[in-house]
Amino acid sequence: MIELHGWLCIRETAEDEDLLPDGAETSIMAKVAKIIEGNTCGISMNYANGMPFLQTLFCANHRTDEVGEIIHIYQHISSVATGSYGMIYLHDNEDAAHFNSFVVYLFRRGHCGIHIDPYFSPCIPTIEDGEVFA
């Protein structure tokens, strides 16, 4: 089973946005819109208090191409709009290395780090009862 929860606050830069050259903000957001355009996984840009963000929930019985597409879109936006920050929490019980853990993709300052979640992992026995079959 796949369980993916993601969010990304989209910020053009980690620097003071008032110091960006004229048109830079518009150019960056146009690139972000192009990255999102035409995706097949249902991602769309939303706004809260005037700030753009992504919020994604994806669940399926088995890993599909949408999982890779979601991760790629988040990574690509983070590398273009380097002030963006957020995370993806992914549980894939068919992942041989991490079947009993949530893997966290952490986006900040244009980079993506991959970590094992310390709060819900190991899934058995932390959040579920059962036996672990490796």
Image: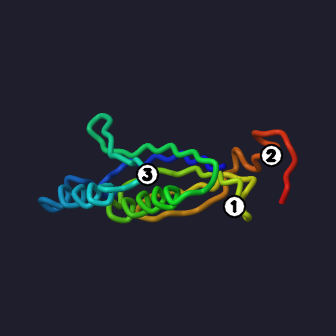
Q: Residue at x 24, y 53 (%)?
A: 17
Extreme-left residue of the structure: 22
Q: What residue is pinned by disc 1?
A: 95
Q: Amino acid at mark 1?
A: Asp
* Residue 57 falls left or right of residue 36: right
The residue singled out by tag 3 in the image is 41
User: Circle 2 is placed at which residue position?
Assistant: 124
Residue 13 found in image quarter: bottom left
- In this rendering, would 76 be left or right of 89? left
The percent position of residue 82, horizontal first and vertical second, equals: 35, 61
Q: Say which residue appears at 29% left-offset and 34% top-offset.
A: 49
Callout 2, which amino acid? Ile
Mark 1 surroundings: few (<14), some (14-19) or many (≥20) residues within 10 A = few
Q: Indicate which disc, 2 or 3, sits on the residue closer to the N terminus.
A: 3
Q: Amino acid at mark 3?
A: Cys
Q: Position of residue 14 (x, y in %)?
A: 34, 57
Secondary structure at badge 2 equals helix
Q: Closer to the camera, 36 or 121?
A: 36
